[in-house]
Amino acid sequence: MKGIKGTKTDIRLKKKGSRYGVKLPNCKITAQSPIEPIPMPPRVIISLSQNPGAPCKPLVNKGDKVLTGQKIGNSEEFISAPVHATVSGEVSDILTTIDPGTGQHKQALLLTSDGKDEWVKLDAPANPDELSVKDILKRIREAGIVGLGGAVFPSHAKLSLAEDTKIDTLILNGCECEPYITADHRAMLEYGDKILSGLNIIKKVVSPDNIYIAIEDNKRDAIKHLEGLIASMEGDNYFKIVSRKAKYPAGAEKTLIETLLGRQVPINGLPLDVGVIVHNVNTVKAIHDAVVDGKPFIERVVTVTGSVKNPKNLLVRLGTPLGSLIDYCGGIEGEAVEIINGGPMTGVSQPDLGSPVTKGTNCLLVKENRPVKERDCIRCGCCLEVCPMRLEPSTLARYARAGRYDDCLRYYIDDCFECGCCTYVCPSNIPILQYIKTAKVELARRANSATG
Amino acid sequence: MPQGKNKKKAPPEVSPVFPAPHLRKGQTTTKIMYIVVLVLLLPTASSIYYFGYNALLIISTSIATAVLTEYLSKKLRGKAFVMDGSAVITGLLLALTLPPTVPLWMVALGSFFAIAIAKEAFGGLGHNIFNPALAGRAFLQVSFPISMTTWVAPTGFSFDAVTSASPLSDTFTWEAEKLSLYKELFLGNTSGSIGETMTLLILLGGILLIATRIIDWRTPVAYIGAVALLSFALGQDAIFHLLSGGLMLGAFFMATDYVTSPITRRGKLIFGLGAGVLTVLIRLYSGMPEGVCFSILIMNALTPLIDRYATVKPYGFRKGIRSEG
């Protein structure tokens, strides 16, 4: 649905939420805890590949001195984002780390802090109105900003539009539909003005006809707060807040576009194909910091929650080991606990706490969990009823389990964005999502070996 | 107690790892099965009300044989036996479709066939192609046609059974006005299989299952709708066809069996329509008075085919865009 540039598209918002997805327990126990900066870690591990796209090459050598905010890894490729030193000190080692979000081994730099937090000379603060679109995109890239809603796709790449692409709707995503996580919620309450400023910057880059701020109705204080800020803003009321019933995965990009606008992003397509661009609230805040203050993206909000003594929202320097976050929150409580990087639906279990916080870490959840016994599928069809992509999860799982990966393609396995609803509802405790992920990995491996 | 065992275990170095999602709804197959059993108590109550001791004996024989058969076949196959309630449903459903005077050894044989041959031989719950209860009933029907079509009028707990034609048989006659016939059929005061006569309670149970989202409304509505429309189109008394025989029990409790019916919504509609058409055709043009059992079994056989073609269009589907393979 590419519009013609120059014509304004009328949008009729959909009233009802999606009939797909699941109602989940809220568990947002840290909703009222203000964001707390945690003390500078003595050591940080900066992975050179924290987002999809090309990995960075190190720009420093072992033994070099680095300053906070100094660019220490970069790539020539377009779809890639540089990484920065998040403490001042010395490069102690170049090593391999396990990415907590994907479980893959990544090259990383180990930095030892000198405790002084001396900053590199930043770009001069700028008024975004006086910057060209090109300069704005350059600042976003140089700051190493990626999508913080989960996909960690480099933001400058998402915002670089082809000449003939018309964006009629920009959506600011503050849904945060996964239980426990409150990083976006707190950001909206505490960085509201910066988020709106960042939204204005994006508005300048993509010049949309409409801008919506989507927030789930379990965050009424955030809705109220942003409404107040918008009302006090000068100029016309360009931003419209839309609240949606809390239903997982309402905040997933494709689901959000459908429930809000009634449009479906084509299979293997992008939101751009239906004239939409979606950005997460914390990403937009980081864009403000980068463009207005010239600050690189070196710290983020992480919700540490679940079975820890004092659940909190923390402002954490990237590269801080996950264990430090838990220690800061008073340690683990209870037994048989699982430590999850991310939320309870999509997060990844961590075997140890040495892995660092990366750009994509929005939550560290400590939760009791026990193995469940997988039984045979009774074909109840619950997974089909909840799948937001209208796939047949049970069929995919059956084929994946049998190693019939080509048949998985026939059932649109690529369309699955791994929300986990199917597995959540399955009465036979079948790890459907795990089967699907396995099949995807195997299919990617085959595609790679076929082309390479 | 020895000192060593009393020591508290040191916390493991490595935290346990689980695949996402880390939350579960907590629904289990066992819970679903027992909810169905609870709802089936409604037609069970009517069967005992109308057919007394006969019904009680048939039902308990059938359930006991089903559970025992499942236990033994699991043992033979070296698998763990789980009292998941599915054998109870099979036994109970089979019993409800049997005539009140059927010998108990026949009940046991049918129940054994349902579990051992129709279910366990295919791999157990989730792997059977045919609805086990209906397969058991079909086995009895073709093996013992006389016993399976001997009907008596409902007598409650008294023993003086009087043979009487079932409403669907050729010899059935009704002199009084139509409305009173409908009333008798609706309340189940007619001869027939023990659990199939009382439409009222079956309907109530079916609505309960739909309301609790255990079954999808599409299958029974398509099934019953197809029977009504086709019998009406063929010049038959549509209301009579809806209220008599095993249609209601079949539409709500057998055609909706998860394992043996299609998984997509469109598939469920097709399944219901097909079963409805077959039921009317069998009732009107075959040698058998009733067609519910065989029509559902035929549709069971077609289920994999329906599943293959009645797929759902995924989100973002566009003509021309298709995954390869």
Image (tube, rainbow, N blue to C red):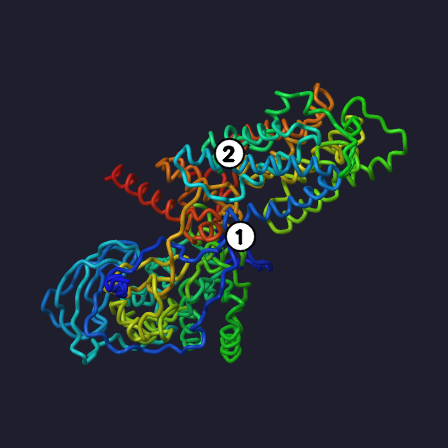
Along the viewing direction, whichever of B80 and A33 lies nearer the viewer: B80
Looking at numbered disc 2 in the image, what kind of residue is underneath it? Answer: Thr
Name the residue: 44% across, 59% down.
A277
Along the viewing direction, whichever of A218 and A241 lies nearer the viewer: A218
The quarter of the rendered structure image containing the C terminus of chain B is top left
- Mark 1 surroundings within 10 Å by alpha-carbon count, few (fewer than 14), some (14 through 19), many (20 or more): many
Q: Is A398 on the left or on the right of B252, as rendered? A: left
Location of residue A109 in the rendering, given as x and y in whole percent from the top left corner: 17, 64
Cα distance in 3D space between marks 2 and 1:
40 Å
The quarter of the rendered structure image containing the N terminus of chain B is bottom left
Name the residue: 32% across, 78% down.
A37
Q: Is residue A27 visible?
A: yes
The residue singled out by tag 2 in the image is B69
- The chain letter under disc 1 is A
Looking at numbered disc 1 in the image, what kind of residue is underneath it? Answer: Tyr
Residue B295: quadrant of the picture: top right
Location of residue A445 in the rendering, given as x and y in whole percent from the top left corner: 28, 42
Q: Which numbered marker is on residue A20?
A: 1
